[in-house]
Image (tube, grey):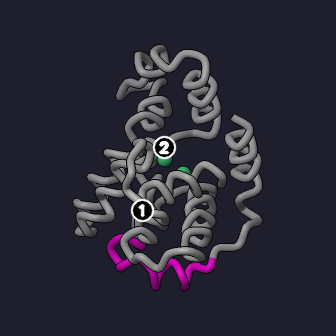
Amino acid sequence: MLYRVRQFIQALLAGAKHIDYYWVSEVLPPNLYKLYLEMPRYEQVHSYRVAQDIARSSNDPYLLQAALLHDVGKVYGKHRMSMLGRCLAVILDKFSPRLLRCLAREHYPFWSFYLYIHHPEIGADKILRAGGDQQVAYIIRNHHTRTHDTAISLLHKVDSSR
Ligand SMILES: [Fe+2]
Ligand SMILES: [Fe+2]
C-alpha cells in the first residue's frame, strides 16, 4: 500500500521527471512508440523508470518493450484511469476486492475501476492490434499474474517497487 502512495506522489511530480525519448524510441518499434506517447505523462514516467530498472539486469528486447508499455491498457479509447480513480481502486482492492470487481464496469463513473482491473488484457490487445510481438503482448497480459515466468516475475517485482 505504501508504494502506491509513493506512486501517487510521483505521479503528481511526473512533469518534472526526465524521460530519454531517444532511448524509448530505440527500444520500441515505431508503431508501439506511438502507443507510448499516447499515455499520460505520469504513466510514461512510471513505465520509463520500470524499463530503466529492468535494463540494468536484462537486455531481453521483448521484456523491455513490455516494461515500457505494461500499463498502456489504462488508456482505452477516450477513457483513462484518473489518479483519483486509481487511489480509490487501490483502497477498495485492499479492503473489498469483491466490491471493486462489482463496480468495475464499462460505463461512467466506473471507468477507472474497470481499467484498474482489466488494463492487462486491454493493453495486450492494443499491442497485437498495433502489430506488436506476441511475446510482448503475453508479458503485458500477465503482468499482474502470479507466475514462474522469469520475465514476468522481474517486471512484476520492479513494477511493485516503482
Ligand atoms: Fe499494471
Ligand atoms: Fe505499472
- Distance from label 1 to label 2 (Cα)? 27 Å
- Report if residue 26 lies within the magenta region: yes
- Report if residue 126 lies within the magenta region: no
Where residue 8 sits: x, y (%)?
70, 44
The vertical placement of 21 against 116, above or below, is: below
Q: Main secondary structure of the magenta part?
A: helix
Where residue 43 sits: x, y (%)?
57, 56
Picture quadrant where residue 47 is located:
bottom right
Residue carrying label 1: 151
Mark 2 residue element? strand
Residue carrying label 2: 80
Q: Amino acid at mark 2?
A: Arg
The vertical placement of 27 against 35, above or below, is: below
Q: Residue at x 33, y 46 (%)?
A: 122
Q: Residue furthest front?
A: 148
**Front-lying residue, 108 or 156:** 156
Picture quadrant where residue 42 is located:
bottom right
**Front-lying residue, 29 or 138:** 138
Query: Which numbered mark, 1 or 2, is in the foreground of this view?
Result: 1
Mark 1 residue element? helix
**Front-lying residue, 134 or 72:** 134
Point out the tag, 1 or 2, that comes first from the N-terminus.
Answer: 2
Q: Residue at x 37, y 56 (%)?
A: 149
- For the N terminus, the quadrant is top right
Where residue 63 sits: x, y (%)?
41, 68
Crowd tier of the residue under label 2, counting other residues whose Cα lies within 10 Å: few below 14, some 14–19, many 20 or above: some
Q: Is residue 8 left or right of residue 158?
A: right
Where residue 132 sits: x, y (%)?
27, 68
Question: Residues in magenta?
Answer: 20-33
From where the camera sits, is residue 77 visible? Answer: no
Q: Residue at x 44, y 18 (%)?
A: 103
Query: Mark 1 and 2 residues: CB-CB less than 8 Å, in contact?
Result: no
